[in-house]
Image (tube, rainbow, N blue to C red):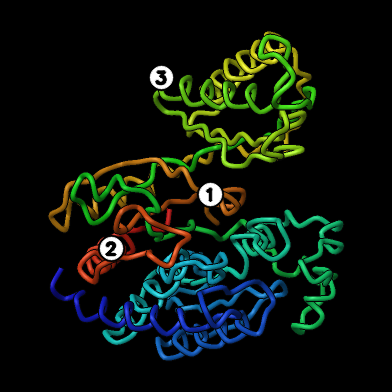
Amino acid sequence: MGEFSELATQVMARLETLGTLSQDPHCLDRRYLTDQHKLANQLASGWMIEAGMTTWQDAVGNIWGRYTSSVPNAPRLIMGSHLDTVPNGGKYDGMLGVVAAISLVNMFDGTQTKFPFHIDIVGFCDEEGTRFGTTLLGSRALTGKWQDNWRHLKDVNGISLAQAMTNFGLNFDEVASACVPRTDLLGYIELHIEQGPVLEQENLPVGVVSAIAGAKRFNLHLEGMAGHAGTVPMSMRHDALSACAEMILAVEHISQHRPGVVATVGKIENFPNGVNVISGRTLFSLDIRSEDDALRDTVLAEILQNIEAIATKRQVKLTVEQTHSAPAVHCDKLLKQALIDSVSAIGLTPLVLASGAGHDAMAMADICPVAMLFTRCKGGISHHPGESITQEDVAASLAVLNNTIRTLKHA
């Protein structure tokens, strides 16, 4: 892996540069269709040109580069990730997958190494969904999954998605031209930081992703009866917050005993939220994920059954609203095996693990085979300025990707 150390130095330096492009001077915050998005695209495009690639920006604002094959009518291997961030985010989430791929192609160009397929690198414009509240906008444009009613989505300043695109120099009505034909795609490979602690626990620099977990999300509303904290006897209360607390513990207890499933309550709203008032109403969220949709739904049914029983026992009214549903996406067997073999080939132990977080690969799976490689990150911290990766782990990631690309054959 020594030969990739210098390349990894370049990757780390470029990630530092990208990390300076923020709409907030106090933290990293780069959102879709902002001036900082435009600057990030220009920066990535410049690096792509240095690597011998032809570049273009598509109709939705994704930035592309092509390392052209010497074979006529060659198929395409797409690599990349996203260039947008969450507010107060880190420098590696998404960006690593774009910058590392560019540096790898830079190496290929320097040695005049050609392949029987084009290598297309994409920097997706919006994976996080921070500005308009809908995730994977950049990658879903490639798959033809944009919805016309998205034109009315608004940001916190009341600017619609359609207007923001116009301000950026794009046209909402031309998004369909960003669609990628399915007929000539070898697949999509995405390098991404793990965003979890497993690789660090196993003392491994990289891991191969088996699947991206499918998720369902709900808002649960509880209606009890507000009352004076000093005058209503404990036995006569219909305390919505106490019911909520018991339900949250039930979610935790059930999911702790069901391997392969994670369930989280991350948000609570309580009313009237007074120090001397019994809670009359609460709202809480439920997020449940698994790489096995059937298992997830079985555990979900058990959780909801327990929650309903608690509501009945405590005499509070329960309303359940589903807000999100996405099926699990399983990585392509051949591409996944190519990554596993490449990890072994560079002298590392292959570890296959699921991704609990969503990625652009989820959308890309609609049009082509997908695979993902994870890079270890310190403490599993992500979506936070404390994101941290090492140059050595980046070098290992580059070595795996290099070996994988060189061994891919066009069927």
Q: Are marks 2 and 3 in contact (CB under 8 Å)?
A: no
Label at residue 397? 2
Query: Number of numbered discs present?
Result: 3
* Camera-nearest residue between 330 and 316: 316
**What amino acid is at disc 3?**
His
**What amino acid is at disc 1?**
Gly
Spatial CA span between label 2 and label 3 = 34 Å
* Snapshot quadrant of residue 50: bottom left
Spatial CA span between label 3 and label 1 = 24 Å
Q: Residues within 10 Å of mark 2 (few under 14, many from 20)?
A: many
Q: Which residue is mark 3?
A: 257
Q: Are marks 1 and 2 in contact (CB under 8 Å)?
A: no
* Camera-nearest residue between 78 and 309: 309
Q: Secondary structure at mark 1?
A: loop
Q: Is residue 74 above or below residue 370?
A: below
Q: Which residue is mark 1?
A: 358
Spatial CA span between label 1 and label 2 = 20 Å
* Camera-nearest residue between 306 and 5: 306
Query: At x 55% / y 83%, what residue is drawn?
Result: 25
Of callouts 1 and 2, the N-terminal one? 1
Residue 320 in view in this figure: no
Q: Residues within 10 Å of mark 3 (few under 14, many from 20)?
A: few
Of callouts 2 and 3, the N-terminal one? 3
- The x and y percentages for residue 267 are 62, 42
Query: At x 53% / y 35%, what residue is drawn?
Result: 264
Q: Nearer the viewer, mark 2 or mark 3?
A: 3
- The x and y percentages for residue 317 are 78, 19
| Image quarter (top left, top right, bottom left or bottom right) of the N terminus | bottom left
Q: Secondary structure at mark 2?
A: helix
Q: Secondary structure at mark 3?
A: loop
